[in-house]
Image (tube, rainbow, N blue to C red):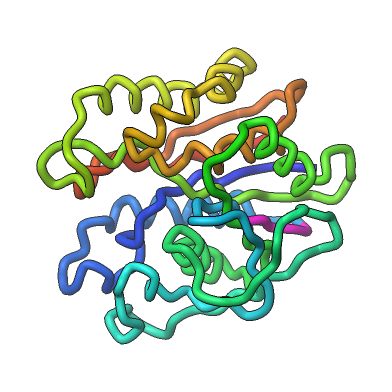
Amino acid sequence: MLVAAALVPDTALVVPGVAGSADPARTLRAAARDAVRDATADVERVVVVAPGPVDRELTGPVRGTFAAVGVPDRALRGTVPVVLGAPDGASSGLATSAGTPAPGTAAAIHLLVAAGRESARLVEVSAGRADRLRALGRALAAVGVPERVALVVVGSASGRHGPDAPLADDDRAPENDARLLADLSDAGPAARARLAAADAALAAELAVTGWAPWQVLLGAVGDARAVDAKLLHEEVLAGAQHAVLLWRCT
């Protein structure tokens, strides 16, 4: 049963050293660490859901490396953390693999180790059918099972804000992101319905990396449960809209 979810940004900048001597994400990182620590306290299982190029579940020891985006391990401050990717018996229906994590998964590994967690299910999802992603969320949270589960949901809103953005500026991004953040901060039944109906094609055009992980989160919560949502921090950093939230199921 899902009891809490930490919604954290999909950016390697939450890890010291990725930006060199600069540390532009200090406040964002602190909020993300707080969210992960609070969400994962006193639960039996933790599941990371992050955006990736393919749908897969990482197993075995997984290092929090950002080699996938060309950041060498020596650039990171301190030891590169390791989390045991540990399937827990509930079937995800995904292919399992070892190897280099996607950047969002690597960021989650750093946040989990900072919170004192040494193992978790590590799931990466690509854009696909929303109903399939929500079904995956139901399976991962084992809806109806008493065991307490926390999700660490990695994803950000548009990466098309201004001249510093990873992709060209798009004037649709501010309005779209405002709607997304309002619904993520509300998390009531109507807000969750709007998130479930969010346009996947528009999300892809605006480089919204959170669309697929948020669909998994919606499935894990289910339709009938109440959610207490709290926005801990939001900012546009390097042209991308990031936010940190904490959801608690009541």
Q: Quadrant of residue 91?
A: bottom right
Q: Main secondary structure of the magenta part?
A: strand
Residue ID at (42%, 63%)? 103
In the picture, the quarter occupied by the N terminus is: top right
Q: Nearer the viewer, residue 244 or 58?
A: 58
Q: Single out the residue that lies furthest toward the top.
A: 190
Task: Find residue 22 and report its horizontal and vertical position in percent.
Answer: 16, 67
Q: Quadrant of residue 83?
A: bottom right
Q: Is residue 19 above or below residue 133?
A: below
Q: Which residues fall within the magenta stretch?
A: 44-48
Q: Nearer the viewer, residue 239 or 99?
A: 99
Residue 183: within the magenta?
no
Task: Find residue 159 and report its horizontal and vertical position in percent.
Answer: 28, 41
Q: Is residue 10 above or below residue 82?
A: above
Residue 46: within the magenta?
yes
Residue ID at (52%, 42%)? 127
Residue ID at (22%, 49%)? 166
